Each structure stands twice: as C-alpha cells, then as structure tokens.
C-alpha cells in the first residue's frame, strides 16, 4: 500500500551549499550575509518598511504584541480558531483578549461580525490568513484605520499568497508575521519574520529585536556605546537558518505553483461527495498551504481519520478553539462561538506538500471516494 504523509520537507538543492558558504564567511549569528539577503528580499516583495528575521512566528507575534505598548484593560480582538501563541503572545504582554468567531464557510475570521466586538478599549485586531487564504479583504486595513486600531496579519501560513488583487499577504497590516517552521510551505527548521508596514513602528521594533538595546545606533556610529533602553528579547534568527531559508525563498514560486495544481486536483476530484464538502478558497491567490474538507456530520470526523490512517494516508484535524481551552477557562467565562467550534469538530486537512506526486494524490482521492459510513 502506498503511504501518503501529511507533509514532507522539500529541498531546492542549494540549502547545504548555502550553509557551507555561511560557515566559510565566518558569521553564524544573525544579521550576516544571508540574513540580509532574506530580509531585503521579503521587504522588497512586500514593499515593507522593515523586515526582521526571527526565531519563530510565535516570537514575531510576541514582538508585535510588545510594539502595541498595551496598557491595563486594553483589548485585542483575536480569532479563537487559532494556534496557541496567536493569543498567548498577546496575553503575555498584558492584552485582554476578545475572541472572534470564524466564518461559517471558512475557518478565517468572520469580518462581518467584528463591529460587535469593538469597544473604546480595542487596541488591535489580529487576523489569521488560515491556510494561506486572505482573511481580511481589501477593506480590513481601512476598517482598522477608521477605528484607530492596529492591524496585525498573522500570515504564518501565508508566505507566497496574495489577496484577490494580487497584493501579498503580510503587506496590508501595520505589522505582519510569517512562520518558516517545517510544517510551512517553505522552511528553515524553526524560523519566522516580523514585517513592519508602518514607519512609526520601525525604530522601536529594531530596539526590541536587539534585546532592548540601541545596538543598531551603535553599529551606525551614532552613539559611542550601546545600552539597555527598553524591554526586548533575543529574537534573531541565526545565519545558518537564514542561509537555508535563502534557498527556500528562491524555490518558493515554483513550489507554490505545484502545490496549487495539487490543490486544484483534489478540489476537482473530491467535490460533490455525500459525506463531506471541500472547503473552498474563494479567491485564486492562495498558496495551497492546506487542503481541507468539512465532514457533514461531526460524528464522521474520527471515523474518516481512522479510515484514512488504515489506508496509509496521514490526515489531520487542526486547532482546538482557544476560547474553550483549559488556560482560558481558568480566567474567563466561556463564550459561544459556533462557527469556530464547527471547524474544530468537522475539519480535516488532507496531505499536501511541495513534492506531492500524482500517485499520492490519486491514492487520497480513491480512498475518499470509497469512504462510506
Ligand atoms: C496561525 C499560526 N500562527 C502562528 C504559528 C506559530 O508559528 P511558529 O511555529 O513559527 O512559531 C502557527 C503555527 O503553525 C500558526 O498556525
């Protein structure tokens, strides 16, 4: 029986050469040759004000949360169908979380319901581009600006995807974050980026990124020594990871193309099944990070996962709603967010990765076509 893993890491072939070259250049800590190449490349692609390569998307979110300068009782609207650090990073910096529900037809946040969540204490909105699908639409930045709140795009899944007008995800929030963890379309093992699209945030971001010091002023010869001036942390991605990432950034456009054709194949072959629906990506510019189906009956979720496992296919559910988590239950009342709970109980992610081949795709399609309950 052919085995179909949920994900595998794809190599362009240049990763090890780049790492050797980085070692030969004599700098393995961050900020070296490859770190500069990667951050300049992403900055240019997104027309950003600044890009900081970071040890993970979780740390990028934590740095973004610090930049909000949260005061007691300041609120941040965050989708509950989300990764843990998507919320914990903000709680750690003092935010009161206001949980947002998902859309009924997609795990992305329900933008139409956001007005009801606004209060005079709302400081920021975080949107997650689930599966590399734009969560905000062209109007979301305008909505945030009208209400005087900061928009943070969590584009952990979204590198290489755009909105319907071709504007890259990560380019319209005041800040945005990316993940380059193994599970993402491109990787350097563990890694991430914080993108700053608001010039007013750049100076403090550089200080917090540099352990809370003014080392960048020192490096530019503007001060004669550097010192502790704010509360930062050690966020820098090492040069070894950046050299690996540089190879992946180059390969990304052709990998995204392959991934999207795999996505389309699944979609064409699996539409119209009696027991599940394909979760449609309503616009073309996603990056096929995930391919998801929604079982029509939640009692079929585990039956389907077990069936696929027995067929040699590794399929997975995804997040547990954060608003119902044990940590949140200790401190606040549990709300009802029906769409978010629906995704927790009904969503299945099928195997998709840069190198998935026709035989593997066909094995998944055939198995699911034969799935009965
Ligand atoms: C939406 C979202 N945000 C943030 C993260 C954290 O990414 P990292 O593993 O790079 O910290 C993840 C992880 O998958 C995620 O799904």
Image (cartoon, helix red, strand yellow):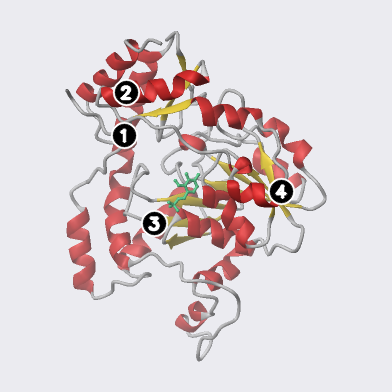
Task: Tell me what residue is drawn at x 56 percent, y 67 percent.
Answer: 205
For the residues marked 4 and 1, what is the alpha-carbon distance in whole angstroms? Answer: 35 Å
Task: Tell me what residue is drawn at x 29 percent, y 16 percent.
Answer: 367
Q: Quick check: marks 2 and 1 in contact, CB under 8 Å?
A: no
Residue 198 visible? no
Give the label on residue 308, or none: 2
For disc 1, the marked residue is: 6
**x and y percent of residue 99 in the render?**
67, 42
Circle 1 crowding by C-alpha within 10 Å: few under 14, some 14–19, many from 20: some
Circle 4 crowding by C-alpha within 10 Å: few under 14, some 14–19, many from 20: few
Q: Nearer the viewer, mark 2 or mark 1?
A: 2
**x and y percent of residue 213 in the render?**
53, 79
140 sits to left or right of 45: right
For the residues marked 2 and 4, what is the alpha-carbon distance in whole angstroms? Answer: 38 Å
Instruction: Classify mark 4: helix, strand or loop.
Output: loop
Give the label on residue 191, or none: 3
């Amino acid at each position: 029986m052919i085995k179909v893993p949920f994900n595998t890491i794809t190599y362009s072939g240049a990763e090890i050469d780049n790492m050797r070259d980085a070692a030969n250049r004599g700098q393995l800590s961050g900020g070296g040759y490859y770190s500069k190449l990667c951050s300049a490349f992403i900055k240019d692609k997104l027309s950003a004000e600044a890009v900081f390569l970071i040890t993970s998307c979780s740390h990028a979110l934590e740095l973004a949360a610090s930049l909000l300068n949260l005061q007691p009782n300041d609120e941040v609207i965050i989708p509950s169908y989300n990764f843990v650090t998507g919320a914990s990073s903000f709680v750690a910096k003092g935010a009161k979380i206001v949980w947002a529900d998902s859309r009924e037809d997609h795990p992305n946040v329900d933008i139409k319901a956001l007005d009801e969540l606004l209060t005079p204490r709302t400081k920021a909105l975080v949107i997650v581009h689930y599966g590399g699908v734009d969560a905000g639409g062209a109007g979301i930045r305008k909505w945030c600006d009208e209400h005087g709140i900061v928009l943070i795009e969590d584009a952990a899944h979204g590198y290489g995807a755009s909105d319907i007008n071709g504007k890259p995800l990560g380019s319209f929030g005041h800040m945005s974050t990316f993940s380059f963890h193994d599970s993402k379309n491109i990787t350097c093992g563990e890694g991430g980026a914080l993108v700053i699209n608001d010039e007013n945030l750049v100076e403090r971001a550089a200080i917090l990124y540099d352990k809370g010091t003014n080392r960048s002023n020192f490096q530019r010869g503007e001060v004669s020594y550097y010192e502790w001036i704010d509360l930062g942390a050690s966020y820098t991605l090492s040069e070894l990871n950046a050299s690996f990432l540089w190879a992946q950034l180059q390969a990304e456009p052709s990998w995204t193309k392959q991934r999207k054709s795999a996505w389309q194949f699944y979609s064409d072959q699996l539409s119209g099944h009696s027991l599940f629906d394909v979760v449609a990506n309503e616009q073309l510019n996603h990056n096929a990070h995930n391919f998801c189906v929604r079982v029509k009956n939640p009692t079929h979720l585990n039956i389907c996962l077990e069936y696929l496992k027995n067929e040699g296919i590794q399929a997975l559910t995804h997040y547990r709603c954060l608003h119902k988590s044990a940590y949140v239950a200790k401190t606040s009342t549990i709300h009802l967010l029906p769409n978010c709970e629906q995704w927790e109980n009904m969503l299945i992610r099928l195997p998709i990765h840069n190198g998935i081949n026709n035989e593997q795709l066909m094995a998944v399609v055939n198995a699911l076509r034969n799935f009965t309950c």
